[in-house]
Amino acid sequence: MRALGPGSVASLLKIALDCAYAALWLVITALVVAMVGTLLIMPFIQNIGHGVIRIDGHREDVGLVLHRWPALEAFLLSSALYIGALIIITNRLRRVFETLTRGDPFRPENVGRLRVVGVSLIGLEAVGYLIRMSVLWLAPEAGDSVRFSISLSGWFAILAVFVLAEVFREGARLRSDAELTI
């Protein structure tokens, strides 16, 4: 199977990216609905005050759950930001793979698209740290399972994307020079 052009690996990856793009839009829509729902419902529930409820046989103080709702909002917001960055990345990669499917990879637009992917990956790393902090705030008992560590593979991928952007920039420049000499 060919790497570029119609019916190639690039065209299959473009289809997969299209499907992922649609799924990500569904997920972010659900997150926004959940955020708006908690913003609208929580002020009314806060007026209930303290009480005890039973959840699966365990006693839970309603006041303890309610005072954490800003953490829930922070978690939903940071998750929406994370999915938003994935949408940006997926969209730009879809456009890059569109040019690969056409058999024309060294387009000047692909340089900017790959740079946006790199910046978005940096944003994903930052939002990932924000999500971990939100989880610790929302569920302090999860402190043992949530670790703060620097993902060397993530940062390596970011550098690789920026290097690929420069490779595409140089390819576009060489292509332009070749078109001028003909």
Image (spheres, rainbow, N blue to C red):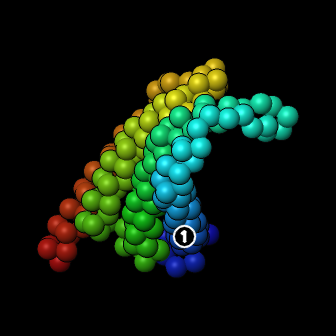
> Residue 148 in the image: x percent, y percent?
50, 24
User: Looking at the image, which is closer to me, 92 or 134?
Assistant: 134
User: Looking at the image, which is closer to me, 40 or 158?
Assistant: 40
**Quick one: SS at disc 1?**
helix
User: Looking at the image, which is closer to me, 26 or 90?
Assistant: 26
> Residue 177 in the image: x percent, y percent?
17, 67
Q: Is residue 63 above or below residue 173?
A: above
Q: Which residue is mark 1?
A: 22
The type of residue carrying mark 1 is Ala
Place residue 46 in its image quadrant: top right
Outermost residue to the left = 180
Q: Is residue 101 above or below residue 83?
A: below
For the C terminus, give its image quadrant.
Answer: bottom left
| Residue drawn where x is 20% and y is 62% of the image | 173
Q: Is residue 176 above or below residue 152?
A: below
Mark 1, residues whose alpha carbon is within 10 Å: few (<14), some, or many (≥20)?
few
Task: Report the label total.
Answer: 1
